[in-house]
């Protein structure tokens, strides 16, 4: 069990303890269609040109630019080619080929005149009304990607467009850090999840609903194990099973200072834990540790981080944002921007607080004003149990120790979502 008195540490120290204890997950081969959102662990080098042939960017007529230097001029239409048509055409002087967007450029032609600038008078005659230069509306071979180029460097966070690029150049599989598999659970016999009427002393569970969404939004694969009864044997079995099949565990509740708690008893016995009190409000208590899972062939025993979040809903959310989420991002290969971005903002209405030696993370709603700056105001009651006011927030104002910030003052805001 942890000592009853713990040193209060700065948030930065707590973050450093957590981040220094986790490492990127081993790289895996991932199919390109599942790679969006992942961090590449190796360079991706193109083996094909994109596009693989010169093609037209518009619907129109493929011509020789020299033939349309003086307009209007009439050319003989030799045929039509559409995208996907492999017919080989050759445009001679005085000729034009009707061509559709994406179709390969014919030999002999070096430009395309848009259909809007042409008038096809008969099936085999077209009048060109606009002069164009060589290369007009033509996409050259390898205009997007050239074979041999490093298209994505290791460390790149692949997005949807990037996954499309991989597919377009036939990079069917890439090396990347996988999504973290996160087991999520809460404890407490007082928690009700089935919608039944509340008995005296009972409350409805909300943290798991909220945290499952937050963890999924962090690009992790989540297993919601639900509420585990206050039974040491049962909780130990659930935690050990989770460590055998997941990369991380997130718990809610049971980490605050106070009387005997099942979570503290079990985790103190089976894991290497750090029980922290941080100089912030809300989310002062936080637990972090490492639980060893079963051994993996060739990799030794798995060491699974455990993030113990407090039970009050707002505290649970903020401690996830400040400590668990950055660590999970590092595990998935991120090196930059582990924390959410912050921005300087103008306070529209006073942000009041009392001096207590802590940094306060106040829930605020922000909008960009006509001055181009972010303006914020609090969303209502700031208690660690008052989740409804938090639901209206899109930022956390970082308010230093003191009496708060007056209207018109400046504050640093961590952007949410």
Image (cartoon, helix red, strand yellow):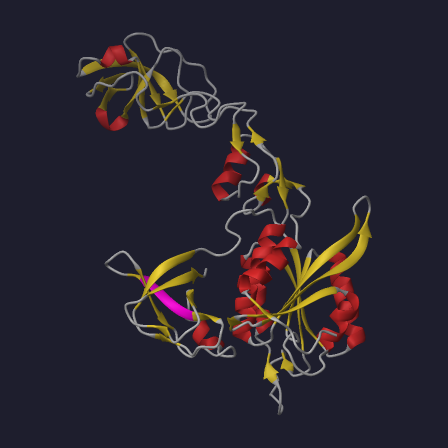
Q: Is residue 399 left or right of residue 121?
A: right
Prevailing secondary structure class for the magenta stretch in the rendered image: strand
In the picture, residue 10 is in which quadrant? bottom right
Query: Does residue 119 appear to the left or right of 184 in the view shown?
Result: left
Instruction: Tell me if I can see residue 218 in this picture.
Output: yes
Specify whether 297 is left or right of 398. right
Pick the residue in front: 226 or 255: 255
Q: Residue at x 33, y 21 (%)?
A: 98
Place of residue 286 in the rendered image (x, y in percent of width and height, measured from the top left) = 61, 69
- Looking at the rendered image, the quarter that the N terminus falls into is bottom right
Please state the horizontal and vertical placement of residue 38, each as a whole percent of the image. Answer: 57, 46
Numbered circles on residues, count: 0
Q: Relative to 205, say whether 210 is above or below.
A: above
Compared with residue 7, is residue 171 higher up or lower down, i.e. above or below?
above
Name the residue: 27% across, 61% down.
369
- The answer to which of 206 and 344 lies nearer the viewer is 344
Q: Could you tell me which residue is drawn at 44 percent across and 61 percent down?
A: 414
Q: Nearer the viewer, residue 162 or 116?
A: 162
Which segment did they paint magenta?
363-367
């Amino acid at each position: 069990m942890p000592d009853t008195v713990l040193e209060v540490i700065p948030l930065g120290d707590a973050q450093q303890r957590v981040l220094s204890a986790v490492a990127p997950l081993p790289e895996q081969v991932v199919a390109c269609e599942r790679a969006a959102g992942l961090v590449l662990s190796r360079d991706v080098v193109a083996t094909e040109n994109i596009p693989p042939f010169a093609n037209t960017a518009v619907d129109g007529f493929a011509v020789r630019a020299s033939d349309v230097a003086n307009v209007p001029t009439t050319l003989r239409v030799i045929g039509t080619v559409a995208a996907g048509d492999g017919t080989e055409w050759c445009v001679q002087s005085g000729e034009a080929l009707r061509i559709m967007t994406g179709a390969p450029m014919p030999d002999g032609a070096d430009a395309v005149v848009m259909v809007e600038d042409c008038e096809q008078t008969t099936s085999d005659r077209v009048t060109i009304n606009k002069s164009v230069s060589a290369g007009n509306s033509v996409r050259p071979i390898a205009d997007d990607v050239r074979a041999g180029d490093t298209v994505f460097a290791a460390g790149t966070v692949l997005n949807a467009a990037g996954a499309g690029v991989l597919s377009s150049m036939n990079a069917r599989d890439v090396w990347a850090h996988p999504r973290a598999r996160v087991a999520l659970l809460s404890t407490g016999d007082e928690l009700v999840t089935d919608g039944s009427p509340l008995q005296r002393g009972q409350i409805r569970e909300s943290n798991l609903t909220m945290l499952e969404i937050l963890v999924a939004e962090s690009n992790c694969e989540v297993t919601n194990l639900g509420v585990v009864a206050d039974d040491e044997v049962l909780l130990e079995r659930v935690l050990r099973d989770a460590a055998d099949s997941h990369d991380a565990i997130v718990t809610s509740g049971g980490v605050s200072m106070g009387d005997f708690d099942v979570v503290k008893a079990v985790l103190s016995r089976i894991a290497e834990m750090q029980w922290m009190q941080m100089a912030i409000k809300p989310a002062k208590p936080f637990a972090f540790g490492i639980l060893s899972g079963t051994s993996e062939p060739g990799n030794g025993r798995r060491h699974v981080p455990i993030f113990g979040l407090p039970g009050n809903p707002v505290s649970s959310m903020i401690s996830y944002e400040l400590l668990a989420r950055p660590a999970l991002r590092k595990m998935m290969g991120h090196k930059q921007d582990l924390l959410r971005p912050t921005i300087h903002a103008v306070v529209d209405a006073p942000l009041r607080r009392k001096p207590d030696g802590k940094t306060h993370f106040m829930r605020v709603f922000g909008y960009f004003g006509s001055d181009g700056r972010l303006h914020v105001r609090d969303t209502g009651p700031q208690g660690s149990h008052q989740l409804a006011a938090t639901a209206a927030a899109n930022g956390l104002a970082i308010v230093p120790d003191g009496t708060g910030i007056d209207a018109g003052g400046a504050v640093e805001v961590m952007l949410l979502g």
